[in-house]
Amino acid sequence: MGHVSKRLYSSASKLAVSTSRLKQFPPKEAILVPDSGKPNFFDPELWAALQPPPTSALTAFAHRIGLANVLSSADVVRRACTHKSFLNLHVKYYPSSPTPPTNANLATLGNSLMGLFASEHLHAAYPHLPTRVLKAAVSAHVGPLTCASVAQEMGAVPLLRWHRQPTTPMSPALLHSDALASIPRAITALVYQEISLQSARKFVQSFFLNRQVDLRSMIRFRDPKRALIETVEKFGRERPKSRLLKETGRYSNSPVFVVGIFSGQDKLGEGFGSSLKMAEYRAAEDSLHRLYLTRTPDHLLQVPSSTFPFKQGNIYKTGLEVPYTPGVLGEAEILYASSGRSNIVAPKRPTLEEIETRREGLDV
């Protein structure tokens, strides 16, 4: 049994089981086959996966995340930590026992709520953020990997009940991180059901939306100068012009140029590089980043779901301390290139010289 004990208490194992709450150790499954008395091959990982987590661990988990009033009983926490894949394993080894409730419905509801909270928060905070970047930012805040990471930080790994499933023609393989991600989603749904939408949003805000995500690295441009020209034209501003601000070592092996891009008297951005072209490219990128990453001040940030009423006693209230004011609806980003997957031939765009010639002709 030394080998079995070593596997059960391995630091790398996600299914370690404490012997202090077991009535018998080693378990009888490790010694005898039920109803036969013959020696049996014992799989400690499978045996550990079938054991329910102790009630004390479930209660401690609810208090640790500050939701003891919502997760009021151990059965509620056990349901939130039971993935639907566990049913197949339970039915196989305990066919006569009632199937335990899972978090399938709760996780689906919680996933929708988290997507709503993240989308409206990011759209209100960054009104000019491009659509694709907004989707990527939502995934970065409340996506599967983030949910699994938050569940691990909560200490939910020993409480998870699941069963690994291989890839099938109808569904991909189920990994540990996928099952672990269902726990924060289920907890979000429980907070919504037991208290209110406002409390669920505060929970998501505390555990997910307060995290720092590098949005700047998500924005990429093929031709930032052209995108900047079209963006400035859309806002009705003067055509951007590049100006050399500083330089050093022009005739050396390592020159450095600093270029600024101006629209009239306003400087939109600046960049540096070992060549004028590189510096101008970075200056155009910096100008677009300054636009797309313009953030609404926190004291002015309001989201639409805060207007939904909730019942407090016999009175319906909203989560607003001041009247709701809709945020700025940002301009759509400039789409000037296609991946070619649509098989649609776009009309040829006029060059900048052709545009200037047409304007001069109209002026005449």
Image: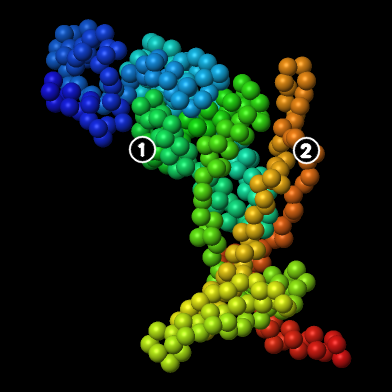
**Measured from the top left, where is residue 206 in percent x and y?**
55, 36
Residue occupying image coordinates x 74% and y 35%:
320
Q: Mark 1 or 2, which is nearer the eye? A: 2
Residue 174 seen in the current view: no
Residue nearer the viewer, 67 or 231:
67
Q: What is the total number of numbered labels drawn onto the structure image? A: 2
**Type of residue at label 1?**
Pro
Q: Position of residue 71 (x, y in %)?
A: 52, 19
Residue for point 85% across, 86% down = 362
Residue 192 in the image: x percent, y percent? 62, 27
Using residue 229 as the reference point, say whether residue 282 is left or right of it: left
Three-letter amino acid code at disc 2? Answer: Val
Quadrant for residue 152, please give it: top left
View extreme (right): residue: 364
Q: Residue at x 32, y 24 (%)?
A: 49
How busy is the neighbourhood of tag 2: few (under 14 within 10 Å), some, or many (20 plus)? few
In the structure shown, which secondary structural element does the residue marked by tag 2 occupy? loop
Name which residue lies at 30% across and 12% down. Answer: 21
Q: Which residue is mark 1?
A: 166
Q: Is residue 292 above or below residue 158?
A: below
| The C terminus, quarter of image | bottom right
81, above or below 97, in the image: below
Q: Which residue is mark 2?
A: 322
Colouring mode (rainbow / by chain / secondary structure / one colour)? rainbow
Please tell me how crowded label 1 is: few (under 14), some (14-19), or many (20+) other residues with Cα within 10 Å.
Answer: few
Q: CA distance from mark 1 to mark 2?
A: 52 Å
Depth check, front residue: 210 or 162: 210
Q: Quadrant for the N terminus, please.
A: top left
In what element is the residue under mark 1?
A: loop
Within the image, what quadrant is residue 180 found in?
Answer: top left
- Residue 118 can be seen in this image: yes
Tell which circle, 1 or 2, labels the residue nearer the N-terminal end.
1
